[in-house]
Structure formats: C-alpha cells, structure tokens
C-alpha cells in the first residue's frame, strides 16, 4: 500500500516539550493520525525557567506561536558574565539585540508546556492525548509497530489503551527514556556531571536592563539569573528565574551514577545557600534572591554518551531521549575562584 502523510499513523511517547512540538510540526505537515502517550497522570505546569534560543523560537514562529510566546516570556537582550565577586568579565547582546530576526525568549517551562498543550488540543483535538499511559515495551514488524502501556495511577489495572499499533513510533520520553533503554539495554542511567542545580523563581524589582541574563562564578560554583515573565514586566517587575550550581562530586570520580531527580520536589535551601552568602553584587543581591524565593527544586546535571543511531526501522528517538545536553555549560575562560 502507498503510504502518504494522510494515512500514516504515528505514536509519540512523551507529552513533554519535544513530543508536543513534534505533534504540532506533524500536523502542520499534513499528518492527521497522531497519538501522544504521556506517563504523568495529568499534564500540569512543572519546572522553572527555560531559554529558547532563536533557532528554537524559529520553529515555534513557523507554527504561528510567536505572538503567544512573546505574550508570556521575555525577549532576552543581553548575556553578562561575572566572576563570583560581581566583576564583569564580558557581555554580549542576544536575540534581536544581536541582529537576529527572531528573538531569544526566556520563559517559564510550565507556561511554555501549557501553551503547547493548548495548541495541540486546538489543532489536533482532545482525543490525541492520553495521560496516565506509561510506555513499557514495543514490537515491530515489516508492516507496523506496536507499543504497550501500563497505568501509572494503578499499575495492576490496564490503561484505557493497553496497546497501540501504528506505522511509526517516536520515543520523546526524556532523559530517562524507556524507548532508548529498550534499544540500548546496557546503557544504564544518565551520566552525572558531579554538579547539582538548585532552581527557583521569584517576583522582584528588575535588575540591569530588565531583560539581562547574568552568569556568575566558575565551573564548580555558579549562579545564573534571568527574567522570564512578560506579565510581571508589564507591571514594572521581574519574574526572575535563578539557578545555583555546585560541584558535589569530584570531577575525576569514576562513579557517574546520578542522584535521584524530581523536578516537582521542593528541597531545603540549606543544601547550597551558605556557599553564595557573600555573592552580593551592586545590581543583584544573590543571598537576598535565594532567601525571598518560596520554593526551590534540585536537579543533577546529567547527559548521556552519544549513541550511533536513533532510528531503528519504524521507530526513532527525539529530544532528550536521543541527545540530552547540559542546560548550561562552563563560564568561558574558567574564571578565578
Ligand atoms: C517535569 C519536568 C520539568 C522540567 N523543568 C525544566 C526547567 O525548569 N528548566 C529546564 O531547562 N528544563 C526543564 N526540564 C527539561 C526540559 O523540559 C527538557 O530537557 C527539554 O524540554 C527536552 O524535551 P523532551 O520532550 O525531550 O523531554 P521532557 O520535556 O523531559 O519530556 C519527556 C516527557 O516524557 C514523559 N515520559 C517519560 N517516560 C515515559 C514513559 N515511559 N511513557 C510515557 N511518557 C513518558 C515525561 O513524563 C515527560 O512529560 C523539565 C523536564 C520535565 C519532565
């Protein structure tokens, strides 16, 4: 049978950022038969800030989402690097301010996720999304691929769709991907960099231009802050996303096993705040910023060793399942401690 975009059926595993953007891209390219299976019981806004570089915003612009994106996020105008004493090292314009036709947008991950979710239901309908469906296994033949699911809320009871047969299956199930694990059974957990990240969001008066991103410190002790909320900006305030990063395991430690990660879990500031207590810069008082933030989450900085292939017959990997990267990298030049 001749397959066309109209007849090809596609299962997407994972309703995160990658899975939802993919569904919108497929819909825009004429594919109609798309099902998204998400392990979480409900798709709700989790996370803190995320930075969309112009290349990523271009994809969303082409899906017609730029006005809605700009109504939520901040068009980041500059990135400034400091040492841990607040002395400026280098700064550079970003996004439109750097001459790009498309902005860099800093945004709350939960709000971005909500926007994508709303757009998916508007364009593909409610029925394409299946929450509480944990992908467990697949089999594929020359003709099709079958995905099997369990219920997260009650693993003993079969979910509404225990198995789904489609032409194509895409594993967009994040850094701890089950799809990848089945393709690479000996790979094990992600590689821990040895650094933990603590993240928080706080509403406060703007610093610098009100659209500035600040990176301070060095490889083993780093603090990043940038505004992410347009609504706050319209009221003369800044919704500031911040990340405190500390090395907690030696760089040469052969043990790459990551500590437990949970984006939704609130942790104590005592784990890291002391290290930043003297980081008071003229334009930004970091101890105060940490102190005033109500909730802080913890996450290990991890990636994976690249694999040779992402695609196997009717199945492929996408996003963090295929190529997880660090959300931030080294401060250039390894600044003084
Ligand atoms: C809850 C959450 C909060 C995050 N917060 C931030 C943040 O604040 N800042 C930041 O920079 N990055 C954050 N990230 C990471 C960031 O979203 C990703 O690195 C990036 O968007 C890549 O997207 P992705 O779709 O590949 O993976 P993800 O966005 O991680 O999405 C993967 C999705 O797959 C689902 N899934 C996993 N296993 C299965 C399974 N077996 N069956 C079905 N579904 C499954 C997950 O529940 C998730 O919804 C967060 C990720 C998550 C899951």
Image: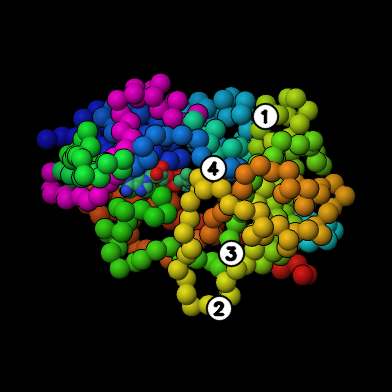
User: Which residue: 16% across, 50% down?
Assistant: 139
Q: Are marks 4 and 3 in contact (CB under 8 Å)?
A: no
Q: Secondary structure at mark 2?
A: loop
Front-most of 105 and 161?
161
* Quadrant containing the C terminus in the rendered view: bottom right
Find the magenta span and give its range. Answer: 115-143
**Residue wearing tag 3:** 195
Specify the quadrant of the image occupied by residue 36.
top left
Numbered circle sitting on residue 230? 1
**Residue wearing tag 4:** 47
The span from disc 2 to disc 4 (Cα, nearest Å) is 30 Å
The span from disc 3 to disc 2 (Cα, nearest Å) is 12 Å
Q: Secondary structure at mark 1?
A: helix
Specify the quadrant of the image occupied by residue 194.
bottom right
The span from disc 2 to disc 1 (Cα, nearest Å) is 42 Å
Label 4 near ligand 1 (CB < 8 Å) = yes
Q: Residues within 10 Å of mark 4 (few under 14, many from 20)?
A: some
Q: Position of residue 205 (x, y in %)?
A: 79, 35
Front-most of 46 and 188?
46
Specify the quadrant of the image occupied by residue 12.
top left
State which tag comes first along the sequence, 3 or 1: 3
Question: Is residue 239 shown above or below 179?
Answer: above
**Residue wearing tag 2:** 252
Q: Position of residue 177 (x, y in %)?
A: 36, 53
**Would you say residue 336 is visible in this rendering?**
yes
Magenta-drawn stretch contains 136: yes
């Amino acid at each position: 049978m001749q397959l066309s975009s109209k007849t090809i059926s596609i299962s997407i595993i994972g309703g995160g950022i990658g899975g939802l953007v993919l569904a919108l891209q497929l819909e825009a390219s004429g594919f109609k038969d798309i099902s998204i299976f998400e392990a979480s019981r409900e798709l709700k806004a989790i996370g803190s800030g995320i930075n969309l570089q112009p290349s990523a915003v271009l994809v969303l612009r082409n899906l017609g989402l730029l006005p809605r994106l700009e109504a939520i996020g901040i068009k980041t105008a500059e990135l400034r690097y400091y040492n841990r004493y607040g002395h400026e090292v280098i700064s550079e314009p970003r996004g439109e301010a750097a001459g790009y036709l498309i902005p860099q947008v800093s945004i709350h991950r939960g709000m971005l996720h909500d926007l994508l979710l709303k757009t998916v239901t508007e364009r593909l309908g409610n029925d394409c999304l299946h929450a509480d469906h944990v992908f467990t296994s697949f089999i594929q033949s020359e003709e099709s691929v079958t995905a099997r699911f369990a219920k997260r809320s009650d693993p003993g009871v079969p979910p509404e769709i225990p198995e789904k047969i489609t032409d194509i299956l895409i594993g967009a199930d994040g850094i701890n991907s089950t799809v990848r694990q089945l393709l690479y059974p000996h790979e094990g957990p992600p590689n821990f960099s040895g650094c933990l990240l603590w993240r928080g969001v706080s509403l406060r008066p703007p610093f610098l231009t009100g659209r500035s991103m600040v990176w301070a410190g060095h490889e083993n002790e780093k603090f990043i802050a940038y505004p992410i909320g347009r609504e706050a900006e319209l009221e003369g305030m800044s919704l500031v996303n911040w990340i405190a990063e500390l090395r907690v395991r030696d760089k040469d430690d052969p043990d790459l096993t990551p500590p437990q990660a949970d984006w939704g879990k609130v942790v104590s500031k005592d784990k890291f705040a002391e290290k930043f207590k003297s980081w008071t810069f003229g334009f930004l008082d970091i101890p105060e910023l940490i102190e005033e933030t109500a909730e802080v989450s913890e996450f290990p900085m991890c990636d994976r060793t690249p694999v040779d292939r992402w695609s196997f017959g009717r199945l492929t990997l996408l996003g963090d399942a295929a190529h997880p990267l660090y959300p931030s990298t080294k401060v250039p030049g390894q600044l003084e401690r």
